[in-house]
Image (cartoon, rainbow, N blue to C red):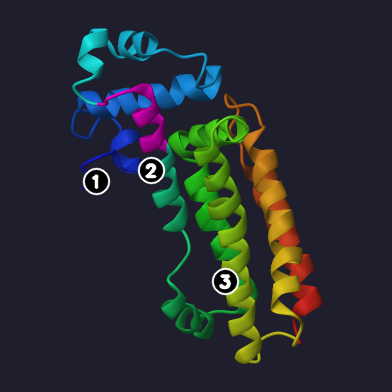
Amino acid sequence: MNTLNPTIEEASSGSNASPKTTKQKLFETAVDLFSSRGFMGVSIRDISGAVGIKESSFYNHYKSKEELIKAIFEFYKTEFTQIMPPEERIKAILSSMPPDEFLRQGNARFMQRLSTPLIKKIARILSSEQYRDIRARELVLQDMIELPLAYAELVFTKMIEMGLIRGLDPKILAVEYQYPVAFIFSTYLMLDPDNPDSSSTEKRLADHVRFFWNIIKK
């Protein structure tokens, strides 16, 4: 169990789960408030009051509001990077399923994670805070753009080496595949949070994989 921050299951737990700790409540409440009002629009008093504790009690769990948002960013980074299978498993996975299914399942895993209310809200925080906070900007650039591109390039390189797709430039393939995927997910984050229907997003992702696969398959 993560001793610094809640896991997705802990932070989004239902009635059958163990009661949330005060620190988990502060974390989750801060995500709610930051995502709707922005980091600068929320005070420690706001967070503490929403949780139902005294403002002074906040400091028993976090030294400052800055430490709290740092914890939120670190939590998202950890959850985001866990979506992608380790490099050493890519070849084995590609040997067990069609390449287009590998792409579909990758999108499905990310969609499942992004659909979690906590993660969706943190993604919105990152979107708004990247212009103010260098940590958010670096996370967006490095972990949400550059890392998926590098990973996609690695996947397409493996596919070419295994003779599964045409011998095209894997770097270009990564850009042409990943940028539309990122755009589709970004559009999903803009949808009404009270109407979280993901069916249209899932269809766009499936259509993109189908179209792209018809281009790169042998």
Q: Where is residue 159 in the image (x, y as percent from the top left)?
A: 62, 83
The quarter of the image holding the C terminus is bottom right
Name the foreground residue: 148 vs 190.
Answer: 148
Q: Which mark is residue 75?
A: 2
Give the residue number, with chain letter if any, for mark 3.
102
Who's the residue at 76% across and 78% down the image?
216
| Residue at the limit of the structure toward the front, as seen here | 134
How many marks do you count on the picture?
3
**CA–CA distance in space, label 1 to label 2:** 9 Å
* Relative height, residue 142 to residue 59 (above, below): below
For badge 3, the amino acid type reads: Phe
Give the residue number, with chain letter if any, for mark 1.
2
Magenta residue span: 62-72
Looking at marks 3 and 2 on the same chain, the residue that comes earlier in the sequence is marked by 2
Q: Is residue 53 visible?
A: no
Q: For the stretch drawn in magenta, what is the main secondary structure?
A: helix
Of tags 1 and 3, the one toward the viewer is 1
Q: Is residue 161 visible?
A: yes
Who's the residue at 39% across and 35% down the image?
70
Q: In which quarter of the image is residue 155?
A: bottom right
